[in-house]
Image (cartoon, rainbow, N blue to C red):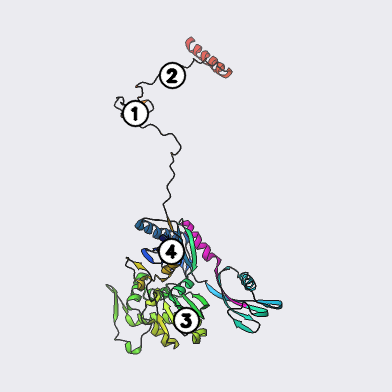
């Protein structure tokens, strides 16, 4: 009979580090019982660990709060990999056979192994996605059993800098945590938010984050393209802070309160000012112009990745992520690029978990964390290890007596209680040791003794 498992997942975001714990029941249902967030603006940069020490501190802080509130000890976590260097790279593997044979699983595995041996300087292959196979003159997704003397395998290798995964492992070790599992976050998010019909008919998932924007494109249920763009919502905030000479927090609040990705001429109102503090005001039209200009740049970069597949995206483009909450983002994309099959999806259409917590998906963007909880299957908590007893194995002193002195210090003798062995009030005297023979003085000692006697004799003569 199955038992509940505590699954813990961590998301290393550009603006914050988030941790979540859920109880997975044997029937597959999930109860979210804890969620913690630690702001860490200087620890992660463009999705990559920038400051290891600060990242360790932030991870330790969120895990400690989960442990204290849930009364558990977390020993391992699931974590997702993303970051600016994450992308797909195409690769083709060819094999010429001596004679026509039926393509076997062994031949396909050989092609896959050869593809994995491809070297990318400074990067490593995290995963590989087969696209199609050309068997003879025909393209197919199922080559096994076809007669041919030549085969080509087309792959998309998902690569990233070697330091990306190494630094994450180093941070978890610094926080005394094991890695229960590692996921490629964009693939995990796509599997959670997109439906099978959408991936079969063709769609693009665009995840707008704080420092990065991730584009994943699917067609015929196969990942066709993946890239992480080094642009995000923080670029807009930084523009506002720089131009108006205000703090980052004030700029972020202005973006969230008044920001819009697109403003039509008919929507423009009379010029008005926005009060920041007692004697500081800014022009609203100028603010909107700054926001729209940077947002258009981000959308233009997204379109450059999508336009090659645009006529095959029958299910359109799906926006998600925290930075997709800005108003009129869909309208802006339609106006700039004349593509109207755009929609925003923060969480799946049917919520597949229960919780007593006040979780706001629009504000917290929990989709990636929820996807990790869903995929995780290993128990992530354990009993807190007991600290070793420093006195274990050593004979402890009787608290009644210290040496030969009765406890209490009042001079009275303790009377044994009922059931205790009677102890004599006065310990029996030990056998006296035999007297030791005095040591004979050494030659050096005899010399100094003579000097001392001579000095005393001089004093007496005087």
Instruction: Name the one closer to the observer, 346 or 40.
Output: 346
Circles 2 and 1, Cβ within 8 Å, touching? The answer is no
Picture coordinates of residue 41, whole percent (x, y): 41, 66
In magenta, the rendered stretch is 153-174
Circle 1 packing at 10 Å, graded few (<14), some (14-19), many (20+), is few
Which sits earlier in the primary sequence, circle 3 or circle 4? 4
Based on the picture, tell me whether residue 159 belongs to the magenta stretch. Answer: yes
Verify CB contact (< 8 Å) between mark 1 and mark 4: no
Circle 2 residue: 430
How far apart are the alpha carbons under marks 1 and 4?
57 Å
> Against 267, is 250 above or below?
above
Label 2 secondary element: loop
* N-term-proximal mark, 3 vs 1: 3
- Mark number for residue 9? 4
> Who's the residue at 46% across and 80% down the image?
197
Looking at the rendered structure, which numbered label has been put on residue 420?
1
Inspect the magenta stretch and tell me whether residue 303 lies in it: no
Which numbered dot is residue 203?
Answer: 3
**Mark earlier in primary sequence (2, 1):** 1
Q: Position of residue 104 (x, y in %)?
A: 64, 74
């Amino acid at each position: 009979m199955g038992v509940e498992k505590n699954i813990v997942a961590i998301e290393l975001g550009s603006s914050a580090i988030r941790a979540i714990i859920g109880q997975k029941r044997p029937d597959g249902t999930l109860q979210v019982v804890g969620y913690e967030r630690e702001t860490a603006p200087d620890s992660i940069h463009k999705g990559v660990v920038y400051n290891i020490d600060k990242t360790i501190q932030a991870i330790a802080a969120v895990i400690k709060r989960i442990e204290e509130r849930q009364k558990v000890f977390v020993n391992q976590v699931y974590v997702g990999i993303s970051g600016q260097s994450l992308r797909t790279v195409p690769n083709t593997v060819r094999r010429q056979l001596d004679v026509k044979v039926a393509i076997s699983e062994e031949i396909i595995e050989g092609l896959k192994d050869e593809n994995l041996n491809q070297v990318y300087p400074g990067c490593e292959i995290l995963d590989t996605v087969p696209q199609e196979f050309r068997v003879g003159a025909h393209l197919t997704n199922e080559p096994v059993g076809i007669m041919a003397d030549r085969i080509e395998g087309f792959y998309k290798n998902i690569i990233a800098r070697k330091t990306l995964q190494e630094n994450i492992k180093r941070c978890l070790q610094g926080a005394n945590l094991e890695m229960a599992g590692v996921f490629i976050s964009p693939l995990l998010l796509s599997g959670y938010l997109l439906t099978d019909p959408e991936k079969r008919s063709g769609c693009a998932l665009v995840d707008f984050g704080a420092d990065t924007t991730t584009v994943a494109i699917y067609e015929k249920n196969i990942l066709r393209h993946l890239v992480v763009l080094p642009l995000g919502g923080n670029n807009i905030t930084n523009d506002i802070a720089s131009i108006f000479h205000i703090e980052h927090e004030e700029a972020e609040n202005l973006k969230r309160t008044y920001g819009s990705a697109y403003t039509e001429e008919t929507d423009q109102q009379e010029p008005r000012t926005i009060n920041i503090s007692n004697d500081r005001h800014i022009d609203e039209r100028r603010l909107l112009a700054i926001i729209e200009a940077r947002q258009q740049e981000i959308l233009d970069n997204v379109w450059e990745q999508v336009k090659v597949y645009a006529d095959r995206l029958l299910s359109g483009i799906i926006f998600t992520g925290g930075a997709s909450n800005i108003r009129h983002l869909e309208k802006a994309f339609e106006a700039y690029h004349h593509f109207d099959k755009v929609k925003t999806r923060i969480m799946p259409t049917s919520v597949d978990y229960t919780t007593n917590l006040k979780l706001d998906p629009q504000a917290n963007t929990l989709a990636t964390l929820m996807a990790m909880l869903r995929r995780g299957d290993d128990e992530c908590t354990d009993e807190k290890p007991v600290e070793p007893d420093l006195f274990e194995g050593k004979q402890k002193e009787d608290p009644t007596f210290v040496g030969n002195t009765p406890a209490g210090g009042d001079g009275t003798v303790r009377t044994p209680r009922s059931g205790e062995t009677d102890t004599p009030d006065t310990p029996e005297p030990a056998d006296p040791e035999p007297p030791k023979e005095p040591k004979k003085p050494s030659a050096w000692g005899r010399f100094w003794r003579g000097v001392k006697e001579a000095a005393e004799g001089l004093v007496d003569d005087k």
